[in-house]
Image: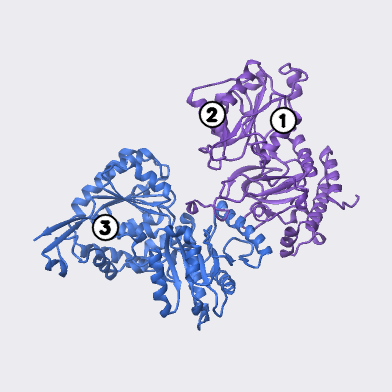
Chain colours: A blue, B purple
Amino acid sequence: MNLPNYFLADLPENTALTPTVISDACQTLKKNRENYLATRTTQNLIRVISSVAKNWLEPDDAFRQETLRLGPAATGFTRETLATGLDAFFQQITAENLQALMLQEFGEGRRLDTLSATAAEQKMNRASFARGPELLTHITGGCIPNATLTSIIFGFLTRSAQFVKCASGTAFVPRLFAHSIYEAEPKLGACLEIAEWKGGNESLETALYAETNTLTATGSDETLETIRRRLPPKVRFIGFGHRLSFAFVTAEVLSGMSPQRIISRAAHDIVAWNQLGCLSPHVIYVETGGKISPEQFAEMLAAELDRLEQQQPRGILSTEEAAAIAYRRSFYEVRAAHSLDTRLWSSHGSTAWTVVFENDPRFQISCLNRFIYVKAVGNLKQALEGADAVRAKISTVGIAATENRAQEIANDLAHWGATRICPLGQMQNPPLLWRHDGRPSLGDLVTWTDWEL
Amino acid sequence: MNTILSFYDFADALSAFIKDQQPTEERFNQLALSLFALQFASVEPYRQFCGSRNISPGNLNDWREIPALPTSAFKELELSSLPPEQRTRVFHSSGTTEQIPSRHFHNAESLAVYEASLLPWFQRHFLADWDELAENELVGPIDKPGFIFLTPSPALAPHSSLVHMFETVRTRLGSRDSVFCGRLDDTNSWALDIEQTLFAVRKSMCANRPVAILGTAFSFVHLLDHFAAGNIRYRLAAGSRVLETGGYKGRSRSMPKTELHQLITKHLGISPSHIVCEYGMSELSSQAYDRAIEFESAELKQAQPQEARRFHFPPWTRAQIISPETGREVSEGETGLIRLIDLANVFSILAVQTEDLGVRRGDGFELVGRATLAEPRGCSLMAK
């Protein structure tokens, strides 16, 4: 596939970007927005976006094929992991889901088109209009492309010109997605810029921030703080810090008809995007008292991960990542030799997968890349006590529970502060309507105009 | 070869091995297997660990097969053949106060082994040129090296193996005015007494005597920050030298090695050929150095080849670079985790798996750094 140089990320690797290049790009984006994007209707945008997403699901789609062909070298994910992850993502991007998102965020589908009102607002003699920022900048972090693609889609819905600054080595998928939009609708593609550089390049970033109206950033707390401090006061800042997730498996489902299905769902959450996202579980809490003990659960999970490695191999890690796994395994091997409360299962001759069982509810941060802790707990309360130290950092809790307990568990988790509760097996596959970190998806981007009739 | 039946027999045999000018691979292997058998028999947690791998002294022929314990195990288990009442000293790994440190227990005998291992290898790398300095009248015939240590004294840091190393060097090799210039700050962290350091440095300059400055990388950063702030550039007497060790552990801004060494050269006038890096840890009893200082006349000083720095342990300690993926030794030029077999770890565990990454280079290694996230807990996300 020979892609034209539409985006800064298309330029040869050694091309030096300058502050002037960044400023010019931003001004072009704004001009193009004015001409091609600002006056579009929500319906039109939904049509374009959902049709591009549909193309990505077609096996013979050129962008998809290119992603799967070059992706393993560019991203470190195997072809199978990329295919599974991208399918799950693009299946969510339907016209129906996009409509539902508009309703969820604005109560009314045409809020960004014109002054409009819900039935309740009509009674109150009010109407409102929401408009997105002129230039929306995304500073992306992490290696999973989904979050970046979602940001781009949201930015189009708010009619914003967008500058996407990818962390070094992560522009590959966003760039191909941008090209797919450009191909479908060049005028929309012209309102999007994709660039990649190592964060902390002050001269480039100062030029970018000066043009920006609203900025979203994903990264560590330190990274976010650094960015925030350097933004001009007029820029609205939306930061997404690193988050942690875990799963909770009740005793009843392990006494049920198909515990193997529960195991398989847990394994899928670990394998998806090699466990590298904020939504991937670090720990699976398993309740005692079921037909299958937490320790047996761990053993069966190990067998399932081994099986999945054949279908969807993890791929090659950097020496440093592999070393983290190897060293941590050696620690648990020692512990397991001394205590029945710890057990270790791991792939032979590789670091492909690791399961550590501990009879200790304390939350443990995994070194990821398919390294999972299984921890035995008497009940949800014990699990939440174990995770208390990271409470403020928790994003998703995947649960496997019978219907009559799920409601109560979800309620407890909601009050405890988890921002997303989902079925086990769906942790790394949030719906389009998911509110990232519990914040409004589009609501944080817009500014309202209220009309009192 | 006589069978080695006790740790004390082993210590004698090791002492002979250390003095041996041409130690053989075969002898190293014999000693390693003997020590493994002794430790297997007397260190219960180690025996249990080996048991989980079905390894016992009876089924081992090669030192490379001796099971290594990760340094993190020294935090969790008491890995010592010394009965509790005989443990007169303990060295702790450095780290944040929230973490449990590694512990390495010693008694008089094991400290004697430690010193017997430390001194010859230290001298060979850091002081090998001393006699030539005397011959060239850069120091007096009976002068001993003056050491400035940038760490707290043994009284302030009794559990630091590094400070014990420096104290051993001071008492056995140093001049009477050798001095510890570190102190403890309000949080009991190591800090540097800048005034005292400058006083000691200036004193050596006034006397035109070569001085040796030894400290951790972060203490040098601290000192050099002071020099940079005051725009101070000293030229220490010819033959002066630096020994730098260890990482930063959040105690100061970290700095790449080459930059640190350039600043040492700039502000202290000590050329890279006289900057030696040490690699050691509290879990070990031997140290590696990345170069030996050679005597050089003033003319030679101008042009010196800058070969890559490689660490070498003494013949009684072997480093292996292990592929984290396969668990096997990597090929020449490849990166892996550093594993060490230290025969001087007599009363502890001889085989230690570090969390440090190194590149295999001949019979030595280049240090790359630490595997981040290797250790459970202590991740920045957990910090409150």
> Residue A415: image x %, image y %?
38, 66
Pointer 1 indicates a residue of which chain?
B
> Residue A183: image x %, image y %?
29, 58
When the figure is inspected, residue B161 is found, relative to residue A163, above or below; the finding is above
Residue A198 visible? The answer is yes
> Residue A165: image x %, image y %?
36, 49
- Calculate the distance from the C-alpha at mark 3 to the C-alpha at mark 2: 52 Å
Per the image, the residue denoted by label 3 is A156
Q: Earlier in the sequence, mark 2 or mark 1?
A: 1
- Calculate the distance from the C-alpha at mark 1 to the C-alpha at mark 3: 69 Å
Q: Secondary structure at mark 1?
A: helix
Residue type marked 2: Leu
Residue A179 visible? The answer is no
> Residue B304: image x %, image y %?
64, 26
Determine crowd level at label 3: few under 14, some 14-19, many 20+ residues with C-alpha closer than 10 A: many
Residue type marked 1: Arg
Is A452 placed left or right of B262 in the picture? left
Q: Depth check: B335 or B204 in front? A: B204
Which of the two marks, 3 or 2, is nearer to us in this view?
A: 2
Determine crowd level at label 1: few under 14, some 14-19, many 20+ residues with C-alpha closer than 10 A: many
Number of numbered discs overlaid on the protein picture: 3
Per the image, the residue denoted by label 1 is B170
Callouts 1 and 3 in the same chain: no
Which of the two marks, 1 or 3, is nearer to us in this view?
A: 1
Residue B328's mark?
none
Is B117 placed left or right of A8 in the picture? right
Residue type marked 3: Phe
| Residue A173 placement: quadrant | bottom left
Which of the two marks, 2 or 1, is nearer to us in this view?
A: 1
Callouts 3 and 2 in the same chain: no
Given contact means CB atoms under 8 Å apart, are the residues at marks 3 and 2 in contact?
no
